[in-house]
Structure formats: C-alpha cells, structure tokens
Image (cartoon, rainbow, N blue to C red):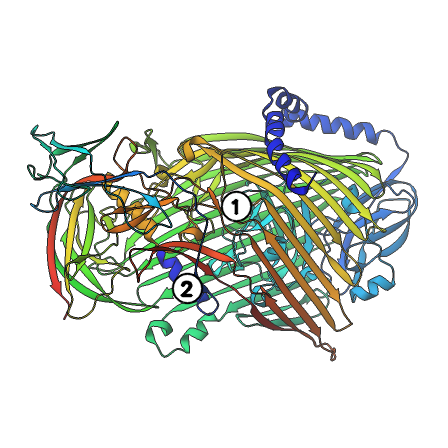
Amino acid sequence: MTPERLATEFVRLAPETVGKLLTMPSLWTIIKSHVMVSGKRLLLFCGFLLTTTLALGQARYTLSGSVKDAQSGEVLIGATIRVQQQPTIGTISNEYGFYSLTLPEGTYTLQVSLVSFQPVTKTVSLTSGTHLDFSLTESATQLQEVSVRSQASNENIINPTMGVERLNMSSIKQIPVLLGERDPLKVLQLLPGIKSAGEGNSGFHVRGGNSDQNLILLDEAPVYNASHLLGFFSTFNADAIKDLSIYKGGMPAQYGGRLSSVLDVKMNDGNNQTFHAGGGIGLISSRLYAEGPLKKDKSSFLITGRRTYADAFLKLSNDPDINRNTLYFYDLNAKLNYTLSTKDRLFASGYFGRDRFGLGDLFNIDWGNATGTLRWNHLFNEKLFSNTSLIYSQYDYQVGIQNGSNDFSLTSSIRDYNLKQEFSYFPNPAHALRFGANVIHHTLTPRNRTATSESSSVNNSQEKSRYSVESAVFISDKWQLSPTFSVEYGLRLTSFAVLGGSDYYTLDANKNIVDTLSYATGQIVTHYVNPEPRLSAAYVLNDNTSIKASYTRNVQNLHLISNSGTSTPNDRWLQSSNIIRPEVADQVALGFFRNFSDNRFEFSAEAYYKALQNQIDYKNGADFQFTDALETQLLFGKGRAYGLELLLRKKTGALTGWIGYTLSRTEKQIEGINNGRWYAARQDRTHDVSVVGVYQLSKRWTLSATFVYNTGNAVSFPTGKYRIDNAVVFNYTERNGYRMPAYHRLDLGATVQFARKKNFESDLAFGLYNAYGRANPYAINFEQDDDDPSKTEIQRITLFKMVPSITYNFRF
Amino acid sequence: MLRYSILLGLLTSLTSCVDVIQLDLNRSNPAVVIEGRITDRDSMNEVRITQSVDFDYANEFPPITNAQVVVRDLTTGLADTLTQSFPGVYPITKLTGVPGHRYQLTVIIGEKSYSALATMPSRVELDQVSYTTDNRLNGTSIRTVATYWDPATPGNYYRFVNYQNGLASRTFFVRSDAFTNGNRVVQTIRDENITIQAGDTMIVDMQCIEKAVFEYFNGLAQLQGDNINQGVSPTNPPGNISGGALGYFSAHTVSRRTVVIP
C-alpha cells in the first residue's frame, strides 16, 4: 500500500471504528463499573491492593532522599533511580526531586541517571529507614558523553504514562528559533501531535484541540494567555525555566480543567551554592538574571527579567505618525526557596508580564498575566510526601479608544485563588500513589466599558463579574503488577459551581435573549459534577520494546471565546453557565515504543482518537465587537480528532535530534454550520513533518537545523462574488472548505562558545529563520482591485522570509 | 480586528510582503442577489436583482430581467407591482416609506419565489457633518464625522454612506447604540476605500435601519476588513430574504448632510 493510500484508509476507517467503540454503551458501562464507580470504592480497592502486597514480604525498609544538580543545588526532576540487584525495581524523582523506594533488608547498588547528566552509582546497606541524597554533575559536552559511552535509559519503554514529552532547558538551547529568542513553546511545536497556531506563533494545538484547551501551568499557577506581542513570543523566559512536561493524553489524575493537554512548566529554584548572573543581548530583546544562595545549602533566590525594544526603532523615526507609537513587553520571574529542615521546604515564586501597545493617541491596548505560588513541601515520613500550594493567577487587558466623542476603555480580567493539597505515597516499590484535592475560586470580569472623557458619548456598561468555584478530588496509583506489566490508573472528580451575583440569560432558538435571570451573591446558578477516569498501561515485551494504551477523560469549564484562530489579547474567557455546558473529551490512545542500539535511538508510534462534546464555535455573521452577552453569538456541537504520531529520536552522541510525523484529522459538527455536516476545524492539518538536528562540530561550535512541513490549515475561501450597492462582496458558501497552501520552512543555527575566563562564560548564537525564503502565506485576502474596480484579486501576505538573528549570551 | 492588523503591520513592516497570487477556487452555481430598499425619500427606492459570478470573472453581474416584483405596505394595504426600468432594476414608484410601517417584498423568478419583511424605524436627524484628520501609521487621512442625538429608547441602528464628489464609497459602515444609547454621538466614519482631499465635496447619508439589516451590513463590513483569513473564518452574513437569495430588504429613513473639505 502506498503511504497516500494508507493515509486515506486510516482517515476513512478510524473515526467509524473507534467512534463506535467509544460510544458503545456496553464498553462505557464496563469502564464505569470497574474503575470509577465512586471515589470511595476506588480508595477501598487501592487499600486492598496495598495491604495484600504489604503482607507478603520480610523486613522492609524505605530508602528516600532527593536528587540534585551538584553545581547549582537545583533539585532534578525525572531522574531515574534503579536498583542493580533487582532490575525491575526503580522509581523516578518527583517534581521536587524527591524519591522513595521500599526494599527488603539487604545491600543494594543504586544508579541514578538523567539525560545530559553523568550517572551516579552508590551502594547502600539497608538495615533501617535510610536517607540518601544524590548529586549529579552535568556532562560538559555531548562529545564527552559519546566517549564515556552513554548510559541512556529505557524509561520511555517501561513507564506506563504515554503521550508525554519532557524537555529540560539545556537540551533545547541549540535549536534555532525566530529572532534568536529561545522559546520553549516553539520547540514543543516541533514534536508530533503539537502544532503551531500560526507563523512564528507560540500558541499551539495539541492533538486537534483548540489553543484554549491547553492547561498551561507555571509553578502550578495557570497562565491564561501565554503569549506576548501577538503570539510571536511566549511568556516563558528560557532563563527562568528548569523543565517542562507536556501531556498530550493520558494525563495523571492530579491535572485537570482543560481538554487537550497539560503543559507543566517548572521554574528554576535558584542556585544555593554560589552566586551567578547572566543574560543575553538579542536583536529584539535582552535578558538578565541573577541567582544565588541566601544561605548556602539552605536557601536561594532567582530573579530574571526580559524586555523587548522593538519600539526603540520606532523612536528613531522622524515621522510623528511612527515615533508616537508604543510597542513592547517585559516580564519578570522571581523565586525564593528555603530548606527549613530535612523535612520541610518552602517556595515562593511569581511571574509578572505586561505588553503595551499604543497607536499615537488613538488607540492603546495593554495586557498581561500575574501569577504567584506559595508552596510547602513536607515529608511526613520517608513514604509520605506532601505538597501544599496557595496559588494566585490573573490575566487582564485594557483597551483604550479615543475617537471623536467615543472615548472609552474596555477592561476585562480573570482572577483565580487556588488551594491545592497533594500527597505522594510510596507504600512499596510496586505502587506510587498520588491523591489530593484542589479548590479554585474564579472571578471573570466581562468586558467593562467606561467612558474616559467628560464629553464621551459612550455609556458605562453595567455587566457584573461572574463567579464560580471549581473543585476536584483525585487519586491515582502507578502500579507495577509484574516485571513486564504496569498501569497508572486514577480518578478525578470535578465539581463546577456557578455562583450568583450577576445576570444570566435565557435564549430562544434564534439566540435572542428572552429572559434575564438574576441570582443573589452566593446563590448557586448551576452545578456540574463530572467524574474523569484516567487509565494507562504498559506491557514490556523486552528490554527495549513495549506497547501502551490509555484512556483519559477531561472536562473543561472555562472557555476562551475567540473570533479568530490565533489568540489575541482581547479574546474573552467565559465560564460554563446555564447556556454553556462543560466541554468533555474522551481520548483513547495506543502506542508502540522501541529503542535501538543500547537505547541511543528511541522510536514511538502513538495512535489516538478523541471524542469531544459541547464544543463551541460562533454562528454565521457573529458580532463580537458590539455584543456584551457573548452567549448570543455561539453555537454548540461535537468534535472528533484522531491521528497517528511517529517519532524517531536520537538523544546522545555528536548528532542529536528527531524526526516526527503526524497524520491527523480534526472535525466539528455543529447545528447551524455547514448544514450540520462534519467540517474540518481550522487547525486540521493532514500531514505534519518536523526534522530537528543538532550537531556538535567541535568543542566550541554547534550547528543546528530544523525543517517543518505541514498541510495548510482549513480555511474559508469564497466560491464566488456578487454586488451589494456598489461594492463587490464575496460569497462564502462553506466554513473551512478550503486549504491554505502547504507550509514548509528550514531554519539554521550556529553557536560558538568562547573560551572560559575565570568564571565568565559566553557564547554567540546565529540563526537564520526560513533559510530558503519560502513565501508561506500568513494570510490570504480577497480584494476588489483598487486600480481596476472591474477586477478582484487574491493577495498573499508573507511575514518572515530569511530572517537572520544574532544573540550574545553570558554568565558569570 | 482592524486595529490588530495595524499592530501586526507595524511589527512586521520590515519583513513582511504582499503579492498577488492565483488560487484554484471552486465553481459555483449562480445565486440570485436581491437588494431592496424603500426609504422616506423620493429617490433611491428600488429593487435590484442580479446574479453572483465565479471569483475569477470580471465584476460584471448579470441582471435578472424577468422577475415579477411586488412591494406591499402591510400597514395600509397598498401594493406596488414594479416595472423594470433598466436591466435588473425595478423602481418603487407608487410607495414612499413611512416610519413605523411594515413592508413586504415578493420576487418571483420562474418557478422560484423569494420574500422579505421590513419595518421602517423612527427617523433620527443627522445634525451635522464635519471632518477630522486621523493620524495612523500609513499616514494622515481625512475622515468625515457625523453628529446626531441617539433617541432614549435602546435599539437604534445606523448605516453611514460617504459620497465623494457625488460618487458613493463602497465601504460598509454601521453602528448601533449598544454603547451610546440616548447620547449625543460624534461618529468618525472610517472609510479605507476613498482618499478624501482638500476641495472634495463630501455628502454623508445616515440611514436608520432595522436590527436585521444592521447585522447584515455589519457582517459585510467584517468581510471587508483585512487579514480575514489569518483568523476569523469569514461567513456570509445572514440576510433577511427567505427562499435562498443573497442580499437584503431594508426600509430605512435617510438624513443627508454635506461638507466641503477646505
């Protein structure tokens, strides 16, 4: 079969078969009765399993501690701890670097490994509960790693979690990016199943999901708009970030609230050994950071900042129409952490970012996120780890318009107070439990309009903030049933209570408001409860081959209403209400994983099918500009997304990188759009290819290249034209019935490391974005020809062709 | 959105480029397009019936010359059976619009029949037309400015049409009183399709239109914006004509003022 034929067959058969399976009542009943009957029974079930396994052994002791970076004292996430005497037993350090292993009395050799660190081996004689910390040293260059013969891990084979990708910042810093701005979100987009929201855009779609269906967490705080400057930059400053994980499916039960993915970003804690500072000077922005111990080994701080100066170029112009404009963003990350005792650690972290844009004195918009997280890690005993977090998150925008007598401002915000308690419990090497609860209070302030001058003809709007409480309890267990079979299963039970204090509406069939309902503050308007079962399993065929399967349900109660495909700062967040129902996604995935050549090559193939309920799109001719009650502009229906993702990756050696391919389809079916037929979602792309290569040429020079190819997005183009008054109007007969031209691009990068002087290190990074100058359309416009009104023309707008960049980075 | 494209333009003016391309667009069956308007003035009351054409054809829209067109004042019961004056143009001669009256348009073409209903809103006077200068990235533009008092009751909708030295602009510009109910409004009319110069005589028509007609023209205005395929999926605005024709039927008042740009 030719690949084309395979593709067509897959695309034809997949939705029918998997769709049927998913909607089959019998299967659903089986899952229900076995997994999610109730949280209580699940607990009993877990308890039973634990007691049975516990009763079996001889004297057992727990070995626990943390894994750290030897140079900086930063805790290391995701390090693998293996017991040489019992090759099937192992664990992974959690997001605070903590690990716990319970073993029978005896002498063991433990090996701890993590990509781009040299593995460490320690022998321990276990005769009582033992505390053992590991310090890992970063491998200086990847060349050395080859010479010591890499100890690559087969963690990807044996871990039951699937659909997950972890990136640590050091592994991605060589990859070339637009304008030299190292942006972790743009690197993520090079992985299969994760697609860019547009040229140079940091927004992304995961397995066909909308961009608001990604839960983006920065030190546990949700970031509601993760982009700066129209999406060309993300809010994540590479200097501040330690590690990021993205779950495309099979999310563990501690995560919830969005349908498509979880992007969990962890900030650096700050070096608790020595003081360091550094930064970078680039074409469009500069960065600075400082970190160091407050008290050596005990506490540390980190502060990073970044600001763009594109507007400085505007100021150079003599033309007042240009130099009166404002355009910049900045962001700040800060973190403090204290080790109070061997059992207690306290973290405080915060992010603050702001974009400002002003068009003379006519128009201005500024927007930004602020997040704060206060966390307390406590070790009750060597098996029970607790994390308590108090989280604040806010996103807001303000638009100012000065136009004749229409002077007014529009402001909108979303604000969360969030309390989370989570326990990790390691009863024995076969089980790792997580359980906890989470309560979030949301305040959504709709677009408030305020007149900004005495003579303004604009009336202030009277819309009140909407309130809700989103709570969840969750439990999950990672269970090694046998040396070859492991499962991670769990349940998340979420409740969303819409609170009164503002107006709600009743709509007729034509979406006109027929009744306004007022509820007193604190009164419950509606209440949605949803169980979200999570299950993933891995069966290891041999040391380097496994198959995995997962089922995940996710529920989403906050919805971003966007009248465009790419996110803009003034998109509006709405919560579930009497009209908007919670969005629900059920995903099943199957995977095949195989490593070659001593785990130096990793191959994976994952197929997924996702069924979505209560999806939102806007009605034909919708108006977002003048409408306060947005519900009147929306339509609801269902969606489906399915695909196959292939990834071949080389993690070690002089040449590293990967090749990814995704074959997928994403569709919606909504009454009132395309006569109720299934139609391609805007982000639907059939083929998606990415190739990433980083080559260590010498000790000083590193070369890199990335290539991407994808089918164009689904778009609506006119099929004809007609005249209204004396204007030519285009006839759009179908939503998303056409395709943008295929997109492809090659980026090149080179980094030269300068000789180290005392403690001063520096490098110079060169980049060339879109190296062969492919004219990828950013937009296609249909216009009446200005010179010859008897004609119409199609204009292609191309943003970036061969954009060079140079960035100087330093650290001391 | 338009403001957004300006920001985008600013950001990427150094690297972006625009060129004209060819796309292979689908063929479509010609659709019937009906534009009907009855006003409270003596002129401009007519029904025009044309057909749509494929995108790559010239902007010549075949008139439909064999239609039977009737406009009826449902409030008084008077009917006007229209006679074609030019190909595809059917003037309304026996009726003049009266605020508050309800009108029915019926068009029969061969086997197919189309109909629409419209009620003429109360008249609001355009008190004054002046001009202002707008400074933007692409230079300074002269804009016309309309001043009027919006009535105290909510639900007023306006359409503004610029005439430059007698020629109507093709820009669709509509406003509602959603933000400005009951106030004196000074409205700058952003019109990107004409370049107003010193010495020009500018006429502005302010039409008081119905909600359905406002939604129709607001939809057309969005289609005229730039960068539509960057984000929002463009859709045909919902018209008020039943039977499957494109277009609209509007009963509106017209208030006209003139300004000469010095």
Please state the horizontal and vertical placement of residue B120, each as a whole percent of the image: 14, 38
Alpha-carbon neighbours of circle 1 within 10 Å: few (<14), some, or many (≥20)? many
Q: Hey, which quadrant is residue B128 in on the image? A: bottom left
In three-dimensional space, the C-alpha distance between marks 1 and 2, rounded to whole angstroms, equals: 24 Å
The residue closer to the viewer here, A641 or A112, is: A641
Question: Judging from the image, what secondary structure is the residue with disc 2 in?
Answer: helix
What residue appears at the point 87 percent right and 64 percent down from the top-left corner? Answer: A147
Q: Is residue A78 left or right of residue A726?
A: right
Q: What residue sits right under mark 1 in the picture?
A: A683
| Secondary structure of the residue carrying numbered label 1 | loop
Residue A556 or residue A723, whichever sits in front: A723
* Residue A241 position in % (x across, y down): 63, 59
Quarter of image, res B101:
top left
**Which image quadrant: the C terminus of chain B?**
bottom left
Residue under the image location 60 percent in, 66 percent down: A771
**Above or below: residue A145 compared with residue A544:** below
Q: Are marks 1 and 2 in contact (CB under 8 Å)?
A: no
Q: Please report, as a chain letter, where disc 1 is located.
A: A
Residue A281, how many percent across, how many down?
58, 73
Q: Which residue is mark 2?
A: B9
Kind of residue indicated by mark 2: Gly
